[in-house]
Image (tube, rainbow, N blue to C red):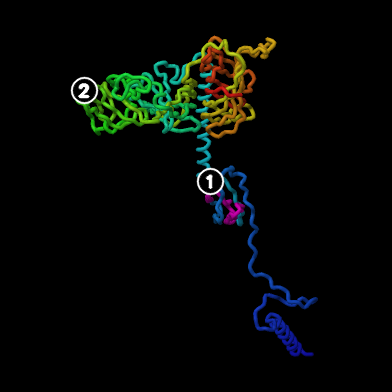
Amino acid sequence: MNREDAKRLRLIATLAAAALSVTACSGGGGGSSTTGDPDPMTMEPAPMPDPTPPDPAAVTVSLADVRSGHMALAAGTVDIAAGGSMDHGDVTFTCAAGGDDCMVKVAADGAVTATGGTVTAMNSPAYQARLNAAAARVAAATKAAMTKEAAIAVEAAQTGDDGPGGADAATDHAVSITRNRAGTTVTIAVDGAAADDPTFMQTMDLGSGRTMHVRAMPADANGDVAEEVMVVSTDIEAPTAAPFAMVPGQELTVDADGVLASGNDAVAFDPGGALNSSNAGDAAVLGKVLSNAFAPGTEAELTFDGDDPEDNTDAAFTTAGSYNGAPGTYKCAGGAADCTVSIDAMGMLTAMSDGWIFTPGTGATSDVPDADYLHYGFWLKKTTDAMGAVTYDEVETFAASSVPASGNVGLVTGRATYRGGTTGVYVRNVYNRDGTIDRATSGHFAADASLTATFGQVNDAAGEGTIAPNQLYTLSGTIDSFRLSGGEANMWSAALHGDITAGSGEASGTAKGGVEGHDGSFSATFHGPVTDANSDPVQPHTVVGEFNAGFSNGSVAGAFGARKTME
């Protein structure tokens, strides 16, 4: 075979192979195919290689250097040039210099991966600023709490009772409490205050008879603002309706013409002689008088006809009205003389002449206020400087009752259980491992009080005492279930134990919060009669007092009020 024949044979072979290749690619159907040459063993078409190069492997980005608490990252991608950084929510991503550009991907589940160069993550400046602000708030709250803790310690060390208003007797604050059908009103008077001084304003109803009152003074030359805060707790109840003539001071003493009478002829109430609101007693009576005839809408003295005895008809002025909420009629029954009333510019009745009588309607009732209630709480003074830093300057606790103190309880015998509530101020600390304070919070609290008083001996039928001698004239119990205004969890409980001084009806002793060698203290006073209508001894129905206690992670100062149970 010559050279030309060989060349022709190679060309034929090449063309034949090309034909086979075209046939394999077309699959006999004339369309394109992604398969290659047939496998020589199976004669099945082999897959064609993917001409697109694979993506670089995605690498998980560590968030170890991002402090916990950041907001969840939004799903999406972030392109970052090599050597650059970009914020994505609370995280700053950085693409290492000298390498490839980076693409960061945040999945819907928050997982973060990156392709390209090396990516690191840290807190974003905005998030770090929030962290710093939060840390500053914690530091400020801790610093303020330390001043309150110091004020609690001063209150705990007092041997006397400064009461609300602090150590300066000129600024003692008298608390008065009233309740009508509309609700309870707590009024706080400031002794020695100037007429234009700020007054206490109720700022919050804390529930269960507890209210908060604040008195803020104007800023001084340094921009410091002093505030007084009081929380008052009371168990005063709503008034009860009583028949008109059964209400003290509302006895029926005259007949329908104003003549002194008794029995069935006494049908009307005489408010008294001429009344003027400048007198406190008169003002109390005038405040109960109400009639449309006494409401001219402007300041005035109004005159009404009396009854001329020479006239056979009763010409005395009569009008509908009410006294202390009881409906009835007012009559000018002073004889021939006219009757007058005086109204001020505010529409208030300021004077009433002699001669008026009030006849209550059939079945009329008046509300009788609750006259047996207790109240307790705390007063504190704090200063906020121009930079917003708070210092608690002083804390005082107080407790009282509307009924007189029991006094000598020497003839009272047996045991009595008292249950009630407490309120006060607290500091709660969180400690580091080395015992130093990491942070602290403070606020006000409510808690439960359960006390047992053991008075004099009770003898059995054989004349033997039933109470151990060392338990006589003691007061003990617990204050627990502390509810803190900041919502902090706690297991606090204070155990009270002390002695009752029989001659005074007062008690005092320790309040143990569980910290060895750091006992707190309490003082208490019994209120209510110690004898009944037959002059037989009875146990006082109320005990009120103040206490302070230290716990392993905090301290409290407060006051309590409790009533005798039927147990």
Nearest the eye: 512 or 555: 512
Q: Amino acid at mark 1?
A: Ser
Q: Which residue is mark 2?
A: 309
Q: Secondary structure at mark 2?
A: loop
Q: Position of residue 454 (x, y in %)?
A: 61, 16
- Specify whether residue 165 is in view: yes
Q: Which residue range is magenta in the image?
A: 85-112
Nearer to me, 308 or 229: 308
| In this picture, residue 400 sits left or right of residue 478 | left
Q: Residue at x 26, y 21 (%)?
A: 354
491 relative to 386 in the view: left or right: right
Residue 443 is tagged as none
Residue that numbered label 1 is attached to: 124
Find the distance from the CA under tag 2 to the CA under tag 1: 97 Å
Is 110 within the magenta?
A: yes
Classify residue 201 by image quadrant. Answer: top left
Q: Nearer the viewer, mark 2 or mark 1?
A: 2
